[in-house]
Image (cartoon, helix red, strand yellow):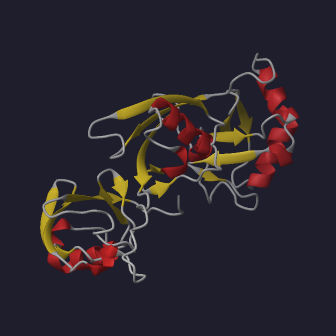
Amino acid sequence: MEVTFETTQGRRFVVEIWYFSTVRRIKEYILKQEGIPVESQRLFFQGKELEDDRDTEYYPIVEGSHVLIVLPDGSPAAAVTAAADGHAAGAPGAVVHVVASGPALGQGRSVALELDASCTVARLKEMLQERTDGALPATKVSVFLDKAEMEDDKALVEFEPSSAEGMKMEVRVVVRQLPPSPACNNGNGAAKVNNKLQQRMSVEVKWGAKTATLEVSDMDAVKELRAELGSAAPHLLLPNDGAYFFIYKQNVMEEERTLRWHDVKTGDTIEIFNGRVTGGA
């Protein structure tokens, strides 16, 4: 069967392979036809990197499938593929059109970027910082594709940003909550904030178009708010696997911190978003 391969330098070619060929065997076909060393090839299909000992039935690759090849930056193989496509070595590769949105940018706002497919997620964050004049600091930003957080060291092409309109990717951006300044000491080793009495308050929790009003304590931790939602607001129909996080004033809320720490006041709205937030600032 014939399978189409495309490198991040923009070169496209077709290789004929046998049904049930292993990934290792496919790389050997590419070496024989295109001269790209097997050890330089990283193959991606449907957003997954292919493992050498798996075959075309496992992934599944069929007649007419498109597979991406990622080559190490500056490698002789990358230079060969670029030159074979009529480009000089080191010429720009394929371009990914990235559209970033999310609570950190404000309702209905987005940022559009054009980046080389070999750029890392860390570079994407730096570009977002530049385009927003520092409003989205690269060290404080988390970027999500669908429900998964994108890892800094991965190239954009590894997420297979392809569509009928070309290489396009829509991501969501959130900014992690920064810790407050240390509370003043009251002279006996305890912070003043701890001397305040707990206060009951009413907050609104929003999940898409659905809302719920809860009576909570300002000393409740965010994880306690999460636990209470199951019984107090079952109509929200939150994901059973707990794959969601809370946003307050365009910042991710930390599960172990209290509502008081996040400066939540009575009548305020806390939003819920799909996905998980990992790592730290």
Q: 270 left or right of 116? A: left
Q: Quadrant of residue 78?
A: top right
Instruction: Kindly identify the residue that appears in the image at 54 percent across and 45 percent down.
Output: 138
Instruction: Kindly identify the residue that appears in the image at 63 percent across and 42 percent down.
Output: 120
In this view, the residue in front, 253 or 153, is 253
In this view, the residue in front, 148 or 224, is 224
Residue sitting at the far bottom: 188
> Is 3 located above or below residue 231 in the figure?
above
> Picture coordinates of residue 177 (x, y %)?
41, 58
Q: 156 left or right of 232? A: right
Q: Is residue 146 visible?
A: no
> Picture coordinates of residue 124 (x, y %)?
56, 39
> Picture coordinates of residue 219 (x, y %)?
27, 77
Q: Quadrant of residue 16?
A: top right
> Is 228 located above or below residue 104 in the figure?
below
> Picture coordinates of residue 198 (x, y %)?
21, 79
Instruction: Kindly identify the residue that appears in the image at 32 percent across and 75 percent down.
Output: 192
Q: Is residue 170 visible?
A: yes
Quarter of the figure with the N terminus:
top right
Q: 188 left or right of 3? A: left
In this view, the residue in front, 259 or 26, is 259
In this view, the residue in front, 157 or 256, is 256
Instruction: Kindly identify the residue that appears in the image at 45 percent across and 42 percent down.
Output: 136
